[in-house]
Structures are given as C-alpha cells and as structure tokens.
Amino acid sequence: MMVKVKECEKRFGDIRIFSYSRAKKGEEHCGDACLVEECDGNNIIIAVVDGLGHGKKAEEASEVAVNFIKSHKNLPLDKIVRGVHSALSGTRGAVASISKISDGRIAFVGVGNISAQIVSENNERGEKLQRHLFSASGVLGWNLRHFKVFTYEFMSGWLVMNTDGVGHFIASEYLSENLREMAMKIMKEHGKADDDATILILKR
Ligand SMILES: [Mn+2]
C-alpha cells in the first residue's frame, strides 16, 4: 500500500526549514499538515497541525487550520490561535503549534498534544540550551481555555516541532546541519505506524 508522504524544504536568508509528513499505515489521507511562510514583512511563520483522529475528516480539519493561518499570517499569534479555533468549529478539530521567527527571537504557542523543542546555541557560556516548549491543553475548534504566547531568544540553533505520531525524543541527540537526514532519523526511530506523523525542523 502506498504511503502518502509530503516533504518540503525552504530557505529564507540564514534560516532553513525542512518538513516531512506521512499518513498512518494503510491510510491515503494525512491528517497532519505544515505551513511555512514569510509574514510581517521580514519574519517567518511556521505551523504544525494535527487534525483529530485520521483519514479524510482529519485532513479537512488540518487544511482549514493551515488555510486560516496562511491568510491571517500577519496577525499577532494570539489572534491567529483564536481565529483558528473559530474557523475549526464544526470540524473534527485539531491541535497545533504555531511559531513566528523574527530577528533573534521566537514567539511560540502550542495547543493540545503536540510537541516542540528548542536547542539554541546562544547562551553566555556557549553551551547548547535544550528545552521542550509548553503546549496548553485543549483542542482547537472544541475547547480552547487559557493559552499563552511564549517568547524565546533564538540567535542560532534548531527548533523542532512534531505531531504525536512521533514518539518522545530529545532533539539535542539528533542535531545535524542536514535537516532532512536529521528528520528522517527521528522519524525512523520514533515514528508510529498507527498514526499520521509529521516533523518540522528549523535551523538558524
Ligand atoms: Mn496524531
């Protein structure tokens, strides 16, 4: 059985992004989706979305979310999240992480069971800093309670975002300048055959 796979590679100045999505085994629709776009003139917006469940309905929900983000990319992140929540009402719903990358900074918001990690190289002692980013509980389109937009310093390093079709891993154990190789290694070791799986890696 063919597995539906989607790969995307983009570069904006000193930022490179690679994303990879594949459907759950035996499924032709992928309920996960990614977005990478320029926004706010000189910034970048990225998103990873997991439509609830799998199959066509999950795919429809993630498409609604991605299309909303794309057409409202210049709004502040909190407004985008509220907008996605409204746009998804009447659908399966989705969980998502959305981030804007600007000069030296990352703004991030996560809602639901979806994960993101930063490995940055910019602390004073020159050590790598590794952290998992906080995701609020809830499902966009169904219940969105309290959420917060977090801002982190990000001069250089990796931002890794993935759906729960990829099991727990520590991004700093996989660092590579070759983002495709890095993504495929994580996917090979941690991808779950019984769920759609997506990983997006940004490197500055
Ligand atoms: Mn999933």
Image: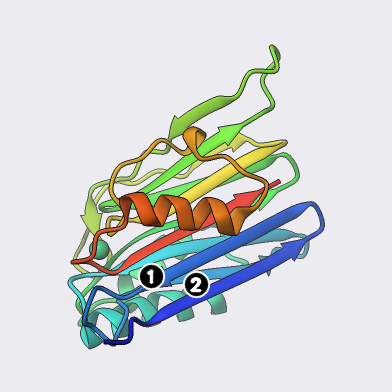
Which residue is disc 2 drawn over? 69
The one of 142 and 163 positioned closer to us in this rendering: 163
Q: Measuring from the top left, give residue 4's x and y in whole percent.
A: 37, 82
* Depicted 191 relative to depicted 61: above or below: above
Residue at 34%, 46% in the rendered image: 147
Which residue is disc 1 drawn over? 84
The reply, left or right, for residue 150 in relation to residue 162 is right
The one of 86 and 160 positioned closer to us in this rendering: 160
**CB under 8 Å between callouts 2 and 1?**
yes
* Depicted 105 relative to depicted 99: above or below: above
The reply to whether residue 126 is visible in this rendering is: yes
* Depicted 159 relative to depicted 56: above or below: above
Q: Secondary structure at mark 1?
A: helix
Q: Earlier in the sequence, mark 2 or mark 1?
A: 2
User: Which amino acid, by three-letter code, is at mark 2?
Assistant: Ile
The picture quadrant where one finds residue 154 is top right
Dividing the image into 4 quarters, which one contains the N terminus?
bottom left
